[in-house]
């Protein structure tokens, strides 16, 4: 028998029809006021509450939107008489039939079509994330800082008031048989020239090598409105300033070839010949065939294609990437900074200690001024109209006029026909494994300039033939100048830069390094 509690002990337990007997009704409880909270804490909790509610509402709206899109797709696109279902339905059903055995691994209450689509999408992103992380961990070097040496370049004053910095190597002007002027490529400086060239080799062939900083690079003053015509003018003024009284050769490597082509177009009378190594041309050149463009663009990474697109269409966005890259003051690998896709030989080569030392020194000198504008200008020059086409350099008879009268006059005239274009020799050395400047660019150049002499390098990429290869440099000089004859005989045999006893490379300076914040 259960024990009950008397009503006297628990007056609230005796209730009849909802009315308590013998106990006065208690007044309604007043709502409790929460204690006051400090101003800052209330705002913080209030902000978090609204933020959570906002994202919760956004997620619910996104789900509903997705369901709506799915319903619309089912009603309009996924019908049996739609184009997609008629053309892609049979292959999809065949694939589903082949993969039917996988449905055994799913719960019974899950739709195989929806489940496996989600699984494959998630798997794709997981593999992509793992691949990116693996690549970053395997190739990313320790963070270093660029060190910029004290300014020590020789400079000339140009007619427009700017200063142009340059460097000389080899034999003096009075003893030189051949003079070479070399503009540098993107993210480089006057220190590059021919990387790793032996001074003894320059002396052996009697060569005077002159390299200079493009406007805004290194120690050269920026140009307010530069183009390839102004670049050719700079080369002309430099040749006069350093005492090159005879014709000179021009060297163009990679992106520096833009300025070499400009000298052939605008000052051909001062140029004896040109030699290029992996010469760059405008990838948007309208004269390129579809096949040539396809072979060119297929060699590049998506990042590089994107950077070319920005340089051509939206150059104002380039400073953001440059400031977070080579202008950040940190050191990175050349293929990462320039979004290069390198072949195996090039990838192995840039890991070499000599290249790494040269790369650090050259980049530091290139970004000395910390100004992004010259780099944007250089990138835009690569992908925009040059003001001329390579076909204009082709040697051809000058047309003195149009019409039947001029034709008849030319047939019976005894005056010799005048030739136009660049009359000197043009040599190109092209690595067939080059993925920075693909061989298709050289193929296009040879098509529009049939007189160009192309030397195809079967086992070389973008860097391996031009950088720190004494035998390669000797082959180039022998092809251009024949057998070495030494400097011109005179009383002064002093070299501009001497080799040491072991004839080590002297391209890079030995002055103390000074850290500079960019």
Image (tube, helix red, strand yellow):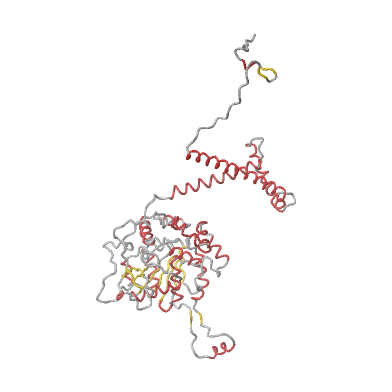
Task: Work out whether 403 lies above or below 254.
Answer: below
Q: Quadrant of the N terminus?
A: top right
Q: Give residue 366's position: percent from left, percent from top.
A: 38, 62
Q: Is residue 33 left or right of residue 241?
A: right
Pick whichever, 453 or 332, lies toward us: 332
Q: Give residue 13's position: percent from left, percent from top.
A: 63, 16
Pick whichever, 365 or 485, lies toward us: 365
Q: Is residue 172 left or right of residue 402?
A: left
Picture quadrant of residue 370: bottom left
Q: From where the camera sits, is residue 342 visible? A: no
Q: Is residue 509 left or right of residue 372?
A: left
Q: How many marks?
A: 0
Q: Give residue 263's position: percent from left, percent from top.
A: 43, 74
Q: Is residue 259 left or right of residue 405?
A: left
Picture quadrant of residue 51: top right
Q: Residue furthest right?
A: 81
Q: Residue furthest top?
A: 1
Task: Work out whether 165 lies above or below 334.
Answer: below
Pick whichever, 9 or 46, lies toward us: 9
Q: Quadrant of the C terminus?
A: bottom left
Picture quadrant of residue 253: bottom left
Q: Please name the residue shown 39% across and 75% down the image.
A: 236
Pick whichever, 339 or 313, lies toward us: 313
Task: Work out whether 29 lies above or below 438.
Answer: above
Q: Give residue 46's position: percent from left, percent from top.
A: 53, 40
Q: From where the camera sits, is residue 245 visible? A: yes
């Amino acid at each position: 028998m259960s024990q009950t509690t008397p009503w006297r002990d628990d007056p609230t337990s005796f209730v009849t029809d909802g009315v308590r007997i013998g106990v006065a009704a208690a007044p309604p409880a007043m709502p409790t006021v929460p204690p006051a909270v400090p101003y800052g804490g209330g705002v913080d909790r209030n902000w978090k509450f609204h933020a959570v509610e906002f994202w919760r509402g956004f997620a619910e709206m996104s789900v509903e939107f997705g369901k709506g899109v799915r319903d619309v797709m089912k009603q309009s696109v996924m019908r049996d008489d739609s184009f997609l279902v008629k053309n892609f339905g049979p292959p999809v059903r065949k694939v589903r039939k082949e993969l039917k055995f996988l449905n055994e691994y799913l719960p019974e209450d899950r739709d195989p079509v929806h489940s496996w689509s989600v699984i494959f999408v998630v798997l794709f992103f997981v593999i992509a994330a793992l691949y990116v992380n693996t690549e970053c961990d395997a190739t990313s070097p320790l963070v270093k800082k660029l060190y910029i040496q004290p300014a020590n370049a020789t400079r000339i004053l140009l007619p427009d008031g700017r200063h142009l910095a340059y460097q000389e190597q080899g034999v003096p002007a009075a003893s030189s048989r051949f003079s070479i002027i070399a503009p540098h490529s993107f993210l480089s400086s006057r220190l590059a020239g021919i990387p790793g060239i032996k001074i003894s080799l320059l002396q052996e062939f009697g060569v005077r090598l002159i390299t200079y900083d493009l406007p805004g690079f290194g120690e050269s003053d920026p140009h307010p409105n530069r183009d390839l015509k102004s670049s050719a003018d700079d080369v002309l003024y430099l040749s006069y300033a350093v005492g090159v009284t005879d014709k000179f050769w021009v060297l163009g490597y990679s992106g520096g070839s833009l300025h070499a082509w400009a000298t052939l177009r605008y000052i051909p009378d001062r140029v004896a010949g040109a030699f290029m190594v992996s010469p760059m041309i405008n990838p948007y050149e309208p004269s390129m065939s579809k096949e040539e463009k396809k072979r060119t663009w297929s060699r590049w990474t998506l990042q590089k294609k994107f950077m070319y697109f920005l340089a051509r269409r939206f150059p104002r966005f380039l400073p953001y990437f440059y400031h977070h890259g080579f202008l950040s003051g940190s050191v990175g690998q050349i293929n990462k900074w320039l979004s290069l896709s390198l072949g195996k030989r090039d990838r192995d080569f840039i890991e070499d200690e000599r290249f790494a030392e040269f790369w650090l020194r050259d980049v530091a000198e290139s970004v000395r001024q910390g100004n992004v504008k010259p780099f944007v200008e250089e990138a835009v020059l690569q992908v925009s109209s040059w003001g001329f086409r390579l076909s204009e350099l082709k040697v051809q008879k000058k047309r003195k006029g149009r019409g039947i009268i001029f034709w008849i006059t030319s047939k019976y005239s005894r005056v010799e026909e005048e030739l136009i274009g660049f009359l000197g020799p043009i040599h190109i050395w092209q690595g067939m494994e080059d993925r920075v400047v693909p061989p298709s660019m050289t193929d296009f150049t040879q098509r529009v300039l049939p007189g160009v002499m192309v030397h195809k390098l079967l086992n070389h990429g973008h860097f391996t033939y031009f950088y720190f290869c004494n035998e390669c440099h000797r082959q180039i000089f022998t092809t251009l100048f024949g057998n070495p004859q030494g400097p011109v005989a005179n009383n002064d045999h002093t070299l501009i830069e001497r080799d040491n006893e072991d004839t080590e490379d002297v391209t890079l300076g030995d002055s103390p390094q000074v850290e500079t914040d960019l």
